[in-house]
Amino acid sequence: LPGTAELAESALFDWVDHASSPFVCDLAYGGIDHLSPLAARAEAAGLAAIDGRAMLVEQAALSFARWTGGELSAIRAAMNAALNDAA
């Protein structure tokens, strides 16, 4: 089942080469105050990881900056702050 701890465990240890120190990007969203199961397990295993929320913010920030001509870093910071305030 997508998004379950069991699938995350299986994916992380069956498909990921830990020796290469990969950066794990999970398209699934975690909750407001937690990462997706795969990203959380990856971090617990010592790997850098993000989930779909971080990707959503990045895509939205890039789009908004191009659309408005605004400063990308300020837009990204505002979106991350809004996400954190929702927690």
Image: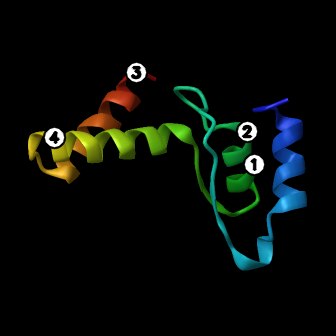
Q: Say what secondary structure mark 2 lies in.
A: helix
Measure the alpha-carbon separation of dots 1 and 3.
Answer: 23 Å
Measure the alpha-carbon separation of dots 4 and 1.
Answer: 36 Å
Q: Residues within 10 Å of mark 3 (few under 14, many from 20)?
A: few
* Residue at 59 percent of width and 33 percent of height: 29
Q: Position of residue 34 (x, y in %)?
A: 60, 33
In the rendering, which numbered label is found on residue 37? Answer: 2
Measure the alpha-carbon separation of dots 4 and 2.
Answer: 33 Å
- The amino acid type of the residue labelled 1 equals Arg
Q: Looking at the image, which is closer to me, 25 or 42?
A: 25
Measure the alpha-carbon separation of dots 2 and 3.
Answer: 20 Å
Q: Residue lying at the far left in this picture: please name it.
A: 69
- The amino acid type of the residue labelled 2 equals Pro
- The amino acid type of the residue labelled 4 equals Trp
- The amino acid type of the residue labelled 3 equals Ala
Q: Which residue is mark 1?
A: 41
Q: Which residue is mark 3?
A: 86
Q: Position of residue 1 (x, y in %)?
A: 85, 29
Q: Which residue is mark 4?
A: 67
Q: State the colouring used for the structure image.
A: rainbow
Nearest to N terminus: mark 4 or mark 2: 2
